[in-house]
Amino acid sequence: MQKTILISGTYPILDEKLNDLLGRSYDIAALEQPFPVNARKFGWVEAVVVYVPYCGEPEDAAAAQRYTGARAAADWATKEGLRCVLLIDAEAHSFLPCFPSACTAFILPELYGLDRRGRPVGWLGEAMRRLEAGERMDADDVVPAYFVLADEAAARIRAALRERADGTIRLIQTRRTTRFRFLGKLAALYDFDRTNIYPCDAHLPHYVPLLEEGERYFDCSETDAGLATLYRQQYCVFRLVYLCKPDELFCGRPVAQFRRMLGTALAAALPRKVARGADCVIPVPATGICYAEGLAKGLGKPMVNALEKLHRPNNRTLCFADVERRTGLIRDHMKLTGEDLQGKQVVVVDEAIFTGTTLRIVCQMLREAGAAKVHIAIPTPVSNCRCAQYVLPAMPSLADSMPPSKMLDYFGADSLTYIPGQSFLEIARPSGAVCTDCFEA
């Protein structure tokens, strides 16, 4: 039975990251009133996560009322014997004694980061928009705070959940800084005009309490390292290859155009015998379509949509850690279109090979449709599935666990061709990709 994590409240910059990480191993659902009725919809509840944003000080009656919902969720979870994890904004730390002592509490710092589409969000998004436009930006240079990448904070929280850590845990850095100095470093990295950033005393409420007796802390990356990761995230080739939609722009250029260029370049890498003998090019829906269009053009062969997705799931299947669950989702969401493939030699295209689950199922389906030969063409180099930038989910790479000689048997294919690393970089670098660490190029 799949375990469930119930979440109460929202923390805009963090909940998307945490949902992506936890969603690989758990079902994620909102905890709503009435709690007992809502919780009975799910089987095994692993934990209840309660967001506690800053709403004011304890002596403020209106603020206390706004905290009521979070306290009610925590009280219910602990009475039910469920594990309760509080994610408390640092400014709301004074409300911690109001919650059950059995809760595990994370005191959160100032978080910054990108959304799933690679756009800076929250106060960072507004600051970058104004600096890029050359507008004046006033930033507090009085109150020091911890500025932590939201992805790193989410990864620390997930690790603590797995280890069943308890007590109060703070996410901190060795050195604190002010927002003015933080934005100065950001401007230097992105080549914005730093003279548009003006120091001020904004009286911002990012008060950072000192560690108290019995509390633990996780030391996070310093500002320079965090911003370097942010920059590589924004210009990550995995985003360009996999995460972005074809109609989006990446560094001002169409993503679809980049993918077609890779497909065309892939045509030159195919063995001559495969290129000549192929009857058609088949994309894995919908991720392989643009690449297949480019490959079909480069080969002078027709592109045939022999497979289709019935409907799009909420998450890409790569987001799920459980292989059986991922396999089931792929089979449930894909079917043959009825194209006549009997006795034909086909070239199937997908953007990359990570775990290989999708391509294995696709090759089986094409064989079932009567294809005489199935050749796999990949418009990216071998993927090592290693990413230090929190963009590509951590997972075992098929290339690490299986030698090339056994992959054809695993897929049930007749040949497997990757685009050469140099050809890949010659297209990816001018398209704006800075980080290509997840591919052996």
Image (cartoon, rainbow, N blue to C red):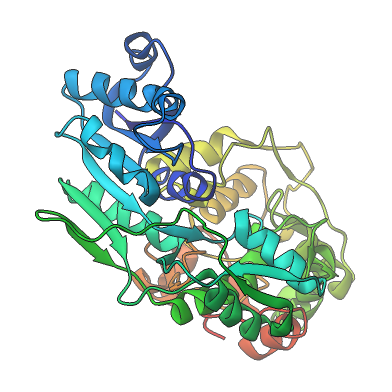
Picture residue at 68% right of the left edge, 32% below the top: 310
**Side (left or right) of 16 relative to 193:** left
Picture residue at 18% right of the left edge, 51% below the top: 163
**Side (left or right) of 65 relative to 234:** left
Give the percent coordinates (x, y) of residue 374: 64, 60
Give the percent coordinates (x, y) of residue 139: 61, 68
State the quadrant of the N terminus: top left
**Side (left or right) of 218 relative to 204:** left
Picture residue at 43% right of the left edge, 48% below the top: 18
Question: For residue 42, what is the image quadrant?
Answer: top left
Give the percent coordinates (x, y) of residue 280: 80, 60
Instruction: Tell me if residue 201 comes above or below residue 9 in the rendering.
Output: below
Question: For residue 202, what is the image quadrant?
Answer: bottom right
Give the percent coordinates (x, y) of residue 358: 54, 51
**Side (left or right) of 271 relative to 400:** right
Which residue reaches farthest left?
214
Q: Which one is nearer the viewer's eye here, 288 or 164?
A: 164
Q: Which one is nearer the viewer's eye here, 55 or 402?
A: 55
Instruction: Tell me if residue 427 comes above or below residue 34 in the rendering.
Output: below
Instruction: Tell me if residue 42 comes above or below residue 158 in the rendering.
Output: above
Q: Is residue 251 visible?
A: no
